[in-house]
Image (tube, rainbow, N blue to C red):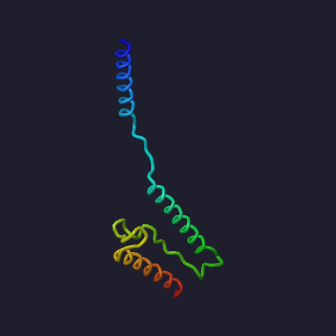
Amino acid sequence: MMKILSLIVFVILLSWTWHVVHSSAPIEFETHSDIQQKIANHLIDEFNIALEKLSRDPDFQDKVFYIKLLNTVGKNDWSAEIHPSTKGFESLANKMHDGIMKELKKKIK
């Protein structure tokens, strides 16, 4: 009799556990690569903020100018995790060219 009662309790608890696990929202967690990506994004963002501030500093305004290149290379324009493909480099070069020309026109005026 005790074995049957134990089996019934076990089945009830198993059913309850299954219900709890499958009725609540899945637990979100970050993978190692997700954390690496967030760290890299943070470092790049902070570096860009520092460069932009430097370009606005009165001591450097005539010596440094800032061209925002963030998000210039599309997701599919990378040949490796940190190296743009030919198309990615073309996008960067075009944006840099436009930024340099804009700054040169300011200097000529």
The structure residue drawn at horizontal position 44% and vertical position 52%, both measured from the top left corner, is 31
* Residue reaching furthest to the right: 59
Quarter of the figure with the N terminus: top left
Residue 103 relative to residue 12: left or right:
right
Q: Position of residue 82 (x, y in %)?
A: 43, 70
From this view, report whether residue 108 is shown above or below residue 64.
below
Q: Residue at x 37, y 15 (%)?
A: 5
Front-most of 90 and 60?
A: 90
Residue 37, percent from left and from top: 46, 59
Total marks in image? 0
Q: Residue at x 56, y 64 (%)?
A: 46
Of residue 36 and residue 84, the one placed in the foreground of this image is: 36
Which residue is more in the foreground, 97 or 45? 45
Quadrant in the rendering for residue 96: bottom left
Above or below for 61 versus 15: below
- Counting from the top left corner in percent of width and height, residue 56 is at 60, 73
* Quarter of the figure with residue 50: bottom right
Depth check: give the residue in front, 79 or 94.
Answer: 79
- Among all residues in the image, which is located at the extreme top? 1
Picture coordinates of residue 71, whole percent (x, y): 42, 67
